[in-house]
Amino acid sequence: MLGILHRLVLMTGKYKGRIRASYITSFIKGILMKAPLILSFCIISMFMQGNMDRRKCMLGLVVIVASVIFQAALEHINNVLQSATGYMVFADMRMRLGDHLRRLPMGYFTEGNIGKISAVLSTDMVFIEENCMGVLSELVSFIISQGIMNIMMFIMDIRLGVLALLITAAFIIVGNLMLKTTLEHSRVKQENSESLTEEVLDFAEGIGIIKSFNLLGDRSKALSDEFETSCKRSIDFEMAYAPWARALYLTFGIGTALMLALAGYLYGKGAISEIYMIGMTLFLFDMFVSIKSYYGQMARLTVTSASLDRIEEVFETEELKDNGIRSFANGYDPEEEPEIEYENVCFGYTDTDVLKDVSFEVGRGQMVALVGPSGGGKSTIASLLARFWDIRSGRILIRGKDIKDVSLADLMDQISMVFQRVYLFQDTIYNNIAIGRPDATRKEVEEAAKKARCYDFIMKLPEGFDTVIGEGGQSLSGGEKQRISIARCILKDSPIVILDEATASVDADNERAIQEAISELCKDKTLLVIAHRLNTIENADKIMVVENGRIEESGDHTSLMSQKGIYYSMVTRRALSVG
């Protein structure tokens, strides 16, 4: 329990001073929790001894009321110091997580970790900030209150004090055994929560394919199975927790009965006075409430431990190193150095190399096209230029500088990317375009939209550029989304453009507009094109055939056709299929 609390405090970072300050108020609150009982005992004692008068009675009443009011005030202070701090802590943590995620290699997001990230954001962080941050100082109050009750028993009689300590020890033993059991089940429960989130996301994202192939039954069964498993894990958790919860209540009941029995026995023997016997009766049913409440928080704190494990696991994922200090701004002569250069690059997503000894150069303003069969490594070559992953060996240089020697921010300023799969945010069209350059003026954004051939259809929308589009751009057609993504890149105006042929999967009506938009984007730019339609890259300065992770052929269209190799075969097959 203390270990979990320590982890929570460490997690609060710069706010831990507020949490520690709450311990002081909780200490005082713990004393005040028992003050009404103790004062009531003192008042009864004075009545029985004949020492009570009107002034003392009124003073006792005032002190009791004041203690209750002060206790409520301390509760409010604790809420400010703890619960409010919890929301600030996790607001900062979500921002740190976003910053951390953008620095991770893209491979992390293709290894089944989307469910984990979603579970951390939507389940773990929410659970801790809403259920756990507010109980930190309460546990201190419970400990103090239980200590006061045990001390009162020693004041009445040492034998009552010893029995109270033994019963408290029994609570601790039962509570720690409960902790050990529920910790294991909470980890399994949280792992299942991650798996369920992954399955729900997979089902939602693939609903179009699922419906079109009439797979609702099969995919729904997989989702239903996950729900059933989640239900079973939750029930298993409760079943594991319930016997220990009953054991705590039994310990409370038996302990209370033993204290009453011993007090009655001692009173019968004349070992304690009538006043102490009445005081014992007054204290009896509140004697072990504090420690019972302390361990009553066990279930949520064990889930907290599993949640912390998963949060820490995500944060501990190694980021791409971003300690480069060189700049692209100076020291480049396009007459002597290529704009882009790959030197003996090897790379693999696992232990097996996907790219093997890849080397090529791209001069400033040149267009280089990558062609070849699916899975050959074309997209991987382009992704490595943007450092979506780090290479295993070799070097990738832009203007003579290793991309690892410059900051990721500086690197991404040099590159614009247009891919077939476009993602737009649930925001205004204006803001979706302005992502390309947030400091751009409205006139510049509108000019970029005109160049991207999307200005006209934007102005026909209800709110024009201020129209809010659905998440992923679902309220727009594929061609419209593609042109908005091109407008982003035009506004960004980076010297290097990576183009995964944007017209490969759009209708004929949109193709011409997109081709015109791409022509605007590519003016005076260095292009690295992943080609799907061979007729679109015949005028490329260099065409490279990528197969099995190697560049098997390289040259312009004419020279490659004269070699009658792989490229020649690809063009011939395309011509025959068209014919």
Image (cartoon, rainbow, N blue to C red):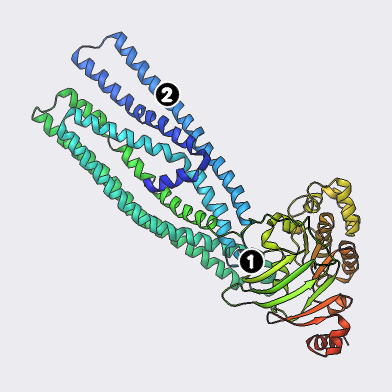
Q: Where's residue 222, x and y in %?
A: 55, 70
The residue depicted at 39 percent of the width and 59 percent of the height is 184
Residue type pointed to by label 1:
Asp
Instruction: Looking at the image, tell me whether mark 1 or mark 2 is earlier in sequence order.
Output: 2
Name the outermost residue toward the left. Answer: 269
Residue 106 % position (x, y): 64, 64
> Is 44 placed above or below 524 here?
above
What residue is rendered at 35% in x and 36% in y? 142
Name the kind of residue labelled 2 in the image. Answer: Phe
Q: Are marks 1 and 2 in contact (CB under 8 Å)?
A: no
Mark 2 lies on residue: 70
Q: Is residue 461 above or below residue 221?
A: above
Left or right of 190: which side holds 498?
right
Q: CA distance from mark 1 to mark 2?
A: 59 Å
Question: Tag on residue 390?
Answer: 1
Quadrant occupied by the C terminus: bottom right
Q: Residue at x 83, y 89 (%)?
A: 563
Query: 10 Å neighbourhood of mark 2: few (<14), some, or many (≥20)?
Result: some
Residue 508, given in percent of the width and then of the height, sits at: 88, 71
In the rendered structure, the answer to whether residue 8 lies left or right of residue 576 reads left
Q: Position of residue 578 (x, y in %)?
A: 87, 85
